[in-house]
Image: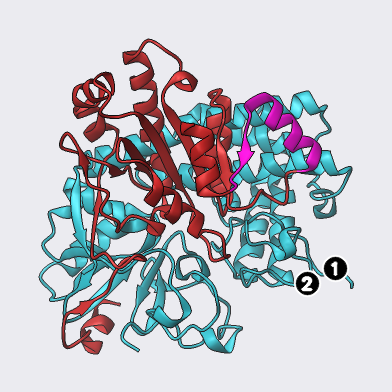
Chain colours: A cyan, B red
Amino acid sequence: MMSNMFCFQCEQTAGGKGCVKTGVCGKTPAVANAQDELTGALVGLARAAENKKPSPRADELMMQGLFATITNVNFDESRIKELTALVREEKEKLGGAPDLPPGELWSGDPDTVSLRSTLLLGIRGMAAYAWHAYVLGKKDEELTAWFYKGMRAIGETHTVEEWLDLLMECGEMNLKCMALLDAANTSAFGHPVPTKVSTIIEKGPFIIVSGHDLHDLKQLLIQTEGKGVNVYTHGEMLPAHAYPELKKYPHFKRQFRYGLAKPTERVGRCTRRRTLHHQLPDAAQAFLCRPGLYHSGRRVPWPGPYPRPERREGFFPGD
Amino acid sequence: MINKALELGGWEEDRRLTGINGGTELTTGFGHHAVLGVAGQVIEAVKTGAIKHFFLVGGCDGARPGRNYYTEFVRKTPADTIVLTLACGKYRFNDLDLGEINGLPRLMDMGQCNDAYSAIRVATALAEAFGCGVNELPLTLVLSWYEQKAVSILLTLLSLGIKNIFLGPTLPAFISQNVLQVLAEKFQIRPVSTPDEDLKAVLG
């Protein structure tokens, strides 16, 4: 079989080996290939930034670009291409450098591919946390600079020992990054206090918020105050109930079930055997709303009609 | 979006939705601030033998079969052990009522996956209190992974020198045999097997 794409970054990858025809997550080959190109462009940006001071815009694009390649975060080819073009613009401002050809990301001897991929995926994961902290106004210069170092390393050859050292460095940086996000969350919303949360859903209008983004949740809580709409959490948003500055809103209550939904127990009409949490486009920042799926208040970044008929109607709590 | 929600009106009656095991009450909010706030109580309970072991069962949830491992594992943890959890893997067991040890809930949800930071803070503080390294604590990490944020957290744990991590439900496709061997030698990381076998390996 001809391979249309290559992606093996999640636990559900096809055959436990890699998605080559289309993504198990719903990612099309066009999106997967555009993400590889974006990744190659980020290596180019990192190369151009060596011994220079990249602009805050370049820093943003570094984090955003990496975040956009995480499983289920962005399925929109045009947005990925737009990001790639913006990354290249910033690269030129820094004097330019060659991108890493996307074909080189996943090629080489199996152990090199393994070590390179582990580093790249670790950097991607860290970028999500760095972005969430950044949205709350927290940025760390050493951490930001390390994204460039890490992405340059992706495009270089290393010995096994050097790769292992890079992996450990990535782990150390991620600890710093999680500490930054912890500081961002606790300074914005207070220290979590043990809180009981019911899963019994009240009658009346509601909006379900899923994902990780406490800042977006706070904005929605402010805007829905006194409007007669309850706000419920879903999936990874559950811990939001414990933050004093979020739990103070009387219309913020309850958890909409759990992360995983069995096919017969779905909140929506989806029939695919997938997790609800993970089948959402942009699960990291998705707003679930009846009868549509919104992303930070806008429709999710999914190009045109949903590509699978069973997804077309979005999520209908109550069906 | 708010107008859309109002227009649609929601459900006419309360709906009794439940967690995966039928429970309707979840508890969250045991971040480092809350847990370290009762550190004295925790340390005392370890010293008196009321708490024999800590498990950190956390990570991502996913749809492939085999993730009931985590439900069964937590269900089978003995009554003198504490289960710390974080991230969305907890939906496999966070509606279970595991009871308490000296007023401390046996199951404590530390937050989102990035709150692995809280778990690290707590583990480091416990190690300090007992004058040992994190690897010498009666603490076992049982992790589930799905996507790349979990990869970054795993790298953090390894960079801290944390050993004997159980990783599941399957090993990453991007870890080659040789790289796995290196990680196993350096960090004694191992794949999960069955809850009974793994509990026996940890507790004897």
> Is residue B160 a member of the stretch shown in magenta?
no
The chain holding disc 2 is: A
Could you tell me which residue is drawn at 53 percent across and 72 percent down? A274
What secondary structure prevails in the magenta region?
Answer: helix
Q: Assign the N terminus of chain A to one quadrant of the image.
A: bottom right
Residue A299 spot, x, y in % from top left: 43, 76
Q: Secondary structure at mark 2?
A: loop
Discs 1, 2 touching: Cβ within 8 Å: yes
Front residue (pair B204, A183) = B204
Q: Earlier in the sequence, mark 1 or mark 2?
A: 1
Residue B161: image location, x then y, percent? 56, 23
* Distance (Cα) linking label 1 and label 2: 6 Å
Q: Indicate which disc residue A140 carries.
A: none
Question: Which residue has dot 1 on it?
Answer: A3
Looking at the image, residue B36 lies above or below residue B75: above
Residue matched to label 2? A21
Percent across and percent down for residue B93 are 37, 56
**Is A240 on the left-hand or right-hand side of B161?**
left
Q: Nearer the viewer, residue A71 or B110?
A: B110
Counting from the top left corner in percent of width and height, residue A47 is at 73, 36
Instruction: Spot the residue most to the top.
Output: B131
Q: In this rendering, would A191 be left or right of B115?
A: left
Task: Determine the chain carrying the residue at label 1.
Answer: A
Range of magenta residues: B176-193
